[in-house]
Image: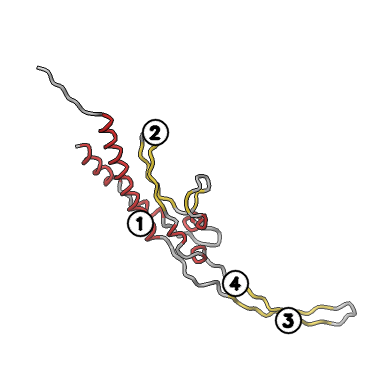
């Protein structure tokens, strides 16, 4: 008795690759939606102008005193997100690619100068995520990434293989 099994291995691999990419893309999209929800969006309000009056006096060359008044106008610091409301949220994008037989999913915000990807106007994404000396951190990507579920990708792949 002989048993013969015909199947196209390339076709099966293409189906598995397509299903993997689709499952990873779905999970990456869920993370991106959560990151957009958590992303701080500034208001359109401008910095507050404060005026200070300073009275000064100095000696002139002939020895008499000269009095003068100086008006100083200062602006309060404005956070990065208030400068361009919605730009950071709109700069969040996803990418799925294969490298060395592994399907990788990325959620990125801001601008990647090396790859020339993203929105150049949202270069300040790391400043918002990690903070600066003068502006406190408002993380939005790390909490969104923590909600990713590799189990959903695995469940989708089990459905394809069976």
* Between discs 2 and 4, the one toward the N terminus: 4
Q: Quadrant of residue 89?
A: bottom left
Q: Position of residue 82 (x, y in %)?
A: 50, 66
Nearer-the-camera pick, 125 or 139: 125
Q: Please give the residue where the numbered disc 2 appears in the rendered image.
A: 100
**Circle 3 crowding by C-alpha within 10 Å: few under 14, some 14–19, many from 20:** few
Q: Is residue 72 above or below residue 1?
A: below
Q: Is residue 97 above or below residue 133?
A: above
* Between discs 2 and 1, the one toward the N terminus: 1
Q: Is residue 145 above or below residue 58?
A: above
Q: Please give the residue where the numbered disc 1 appears in the rendered image.
A: 33
- Label drawn at residue 69: 3
Disc 1, SS: helix
Nearer-the-camera pick, 64 or 6: 6
Residue drawn at x 40%, y 36% is: 99
Question: If the image is split into quadrants, where does the C terminus sit?
Answer: top left
Q: Which of pointers 3 and 2 indicates the residue nearer the eye?
A: 2
Q: Position of residue 85 (x, y in %)?
A: 47, 65
Disc 4, SS: strand
Q: Position of residue 93 (x, y in %)?
A: 41, 52
Q: Which of pointers 4 and 1 indicates the residue nearer the eye?
A: 1
Disc 3, SS: strand
**Circle 2 crowding by C-alpha within 10 Å: few under 14, some 14–19, many from 20:** few
* Between discs 3 and 2, the one toward the N terminus: 3
Tell me how far mark 3 sits from mark 4, CA to CA: 20 Å
**Circle 1 crowding by C-alpha within 10 Å: few under 14, some 14–19, many from 20:** some
Find out whether the residues at labels 4 and 1 contact each other: C-beta distance under 8 Å.
no
Q: Which of pointers 2 and 4 indicates the residue nearer the eye?
A: 2
Tell me how far mark 2 sits from mark 4, CA to CA: 52 Å
Q: Please give the residue where the numbered disc 4 appears in the rendered image.
A: 75
């Amino acid at each position: 008795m002989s048993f013969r099994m015909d199947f196209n291995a390339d076709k099966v691999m293409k189906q598995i690759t397509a299903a993997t990419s689709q499952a990873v893309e779905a999970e990456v999209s869920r993370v991106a939606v959560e990151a957009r929800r958590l992303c701080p969006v500034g208001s359109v309000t401008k910095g507050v102008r404060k005026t200070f009056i300073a009275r000064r006096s100095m000696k002139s060359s002939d020895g008499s005193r000269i009095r003068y008044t100086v008006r100083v106008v200062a602006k309060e610091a404005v956070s990065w997100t208030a400068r361009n409301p919605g730009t950071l949220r709109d700069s969040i994008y996803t990418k799925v690619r294969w490298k060395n037989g592994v399907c990788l999913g990325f959620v990125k915000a801001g601008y990647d100068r090396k790859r020339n990807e993203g929105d150049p106007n949202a270069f300040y994404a790391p400043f918002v995520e990690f903070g600066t000396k003068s502006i406190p951190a408002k993380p939005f990507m790390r909490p969104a990434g923590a909600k990713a579920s590799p189990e959903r990708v695995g469940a989708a792949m089990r459905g394809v293989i069976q």
